[in-house]
Amino acid sequence: MAKKKTPGFECTACGHRALAWSGQCPGCSAWNTLEKALPAPTPSAGVGGGLSGGVAATPTPLREVQAERSERAETGIAELDRVLGGGLVPGSLVLLGGAPGIGKSTLAAMALANLSERGAGVLYVSGEESASQVRRRAERLGDAALDVPILAENSLESVIATIVEERPQVCVIDSVQTLSVGDSAPGSLAAVREVTQALLETGKSRDVTMILVGHVTKEGSLAGPRSLEHLVDCVLHFEGERERSFRTVRAVKNRFGATSEVGVFEMRSAGLVEVLDPSARFAGEASPAAGSVICCSMEGTRPILVEVQALVAPSEAELPRRTATGIDRNRLALVLAVLTRHGRLPLGSADVFVNVVGGVRLDEPGADLAVALAVASANSGEALQSEGRPLACFGEVGLTGELRYVAHADRRVAEARKFGLGSVIGPEPGEGKPKGMKIVGTIGEALKAAGVSRQSAGRGTQRSARRAA
Ligand code: TYD
Ligand code: MG
């Protein structure tokens, strides 16, 4: 008798399969993420040979394929619609992920309220909160939110039966981790996958748009992330820090639109409010002090001005601290190394803190120069200005100290000019020099153009203090 194959274990974070359980995943080094795996599908006998009886089909030239132009359902939340690529595509499946308390339920409830106000059939399935809890949230969101029908239910079977019966156009499942199916524990990799698969089939066959809310772990991945992302049409990440009011929604996957768009929101007492002109908010509140620089960044098709702040302080520790909020730590390390080596800034024994104001994340390399100049300004203690306004810049910093081209120089500069900022420092724009731009080729030239000195503020006093001690 053939020995029965054990399905083994699978990491909920990276999908790595292991034969034996261990506390740490050998694939991604995450802790306690290995779970019993579903048996791998047995390949049907004779795949790659011996499979016969199929009828040959005729492939069609793409030119002759009818392109479906489905009407999108706008959620009425402009920032969300833009990230979706112009609204919800009928029958699509959207995964809305984010940390607990970030505002996923609020955003989903607001979208359903708007859709229902425009006459679309909607359904809010809550497996997490009771109907009365959902009602309390809706009360804060306004009258239309109270018209949304709710189903407080944990069983997938009864949720699907209700969807089939009610046939809503848009259905929110809050959250995918709270629905139970069969014997598997809700939230386990197997359950989350099965729930998603079943809702996908129901949605596609009945043209119901599904919005699945999913919690992300501390590390920032949805439980069973990789295994869900390929199933769904669109993955939205809701990000931001709970203590701060600004939140961003970005698409990390979108079959019906670009993935570079970002929507900016602010959490207020009456729900999430769209920040339609983030530049005005962020640049308007920029600090005139040393260590502050404005980054002309691009978020998808939209230029956004964001304030980057830095603090440089003599370190007491053997290993100086380098803390980055809103930018990648490795990117900060690179910029600091270039500043030390090619900008000849004495940062070796200093603690460096960098923060992107407003809880915004800058993911593009075009933010490097703003980080570099903010650190240089914090180091020298000189506030950077251009024509009496906060200094604005953009550009990628290369390892040899060169400033590298980034796209859309014209739109970045135009945005800065719109808000009355002076000359914008940046790398060679490729074609034509936008009005109001100062082109620099290296980090050294950028420091010079910004008018920042390489001396550390209070250096003399530190030295004399040490000597005295
Ligand atoms: P929620 O949408 O429940 O977050 P999630 O579903 O992602 O866990 O709400 C997030 C937080 O926002 C919650 O702590 C309460 C707060 N909040 C407001 O400040 N104003 C509001 O109008 C609402 C509905 C929530
Ligand atoms: Mg919630």
Image (tube, rainbow, N blue to C red):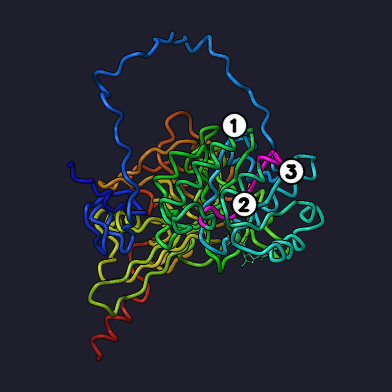
- Considering only vertical position in the picture, is 135 above or below 57? below
Please tell me the numbered disc located at residue 278.
2
Q: Which residue is mark 3?
A: 115
Q: Residues within 10 Å of mark 3 (few under 14, many from 20)?
A: many
Q: Report whether residue 164 is seen.
A: yes
Q: Earlier in the sequence, mark 2 or mark 1?
A: 1
Q: Which residue is mark 1?
A: 205
**Please, which residue is most extreme toward the bottom here?**
469
Relative horizontal placement of residue 452, taking residue 299 as reference (left or right): left
Q: At numbered mark 2, what does the secondary structure look like: helix, strand or loop?
A: helix
Q: At numbered mark 1, what does the secondary structure look like: helix, strand or loop?
A: helix
Three-letter code for the amino acid on which mark 1 is drawn:
Ser
Three-letter code for the amino acid on which mark 2 is drawn:
Pro
Q: Report whether residue 385 is seen.
A: no
* Residue 347 % position (x, y): 29, 66
Residue 166 location, quadrant = top right
Three-letter code for the amino acid on which mark 3 is drawn:
Leu
Relative horizontal placement of residue 240, taking residue 354 as reference (left or right): right
At x 30% / y 76%, what residue is drawn?
315
- Distance (Cα) linking label 1 and label 3: 21 Å
At x 56% / y 69%, what residue is drawn?
243
Q: Earlier in the sequence, mark 2 or mark 3?
A: 3
Total numbered circles: 3
- Distance (Cα) linking label 2 and label 1: 39 Å
At x 36% / y 53%, what residue is drawn?
13
Ligand 1 within 8 Å of the CB at mark 2: no
Residue range (magenta) = 164-177
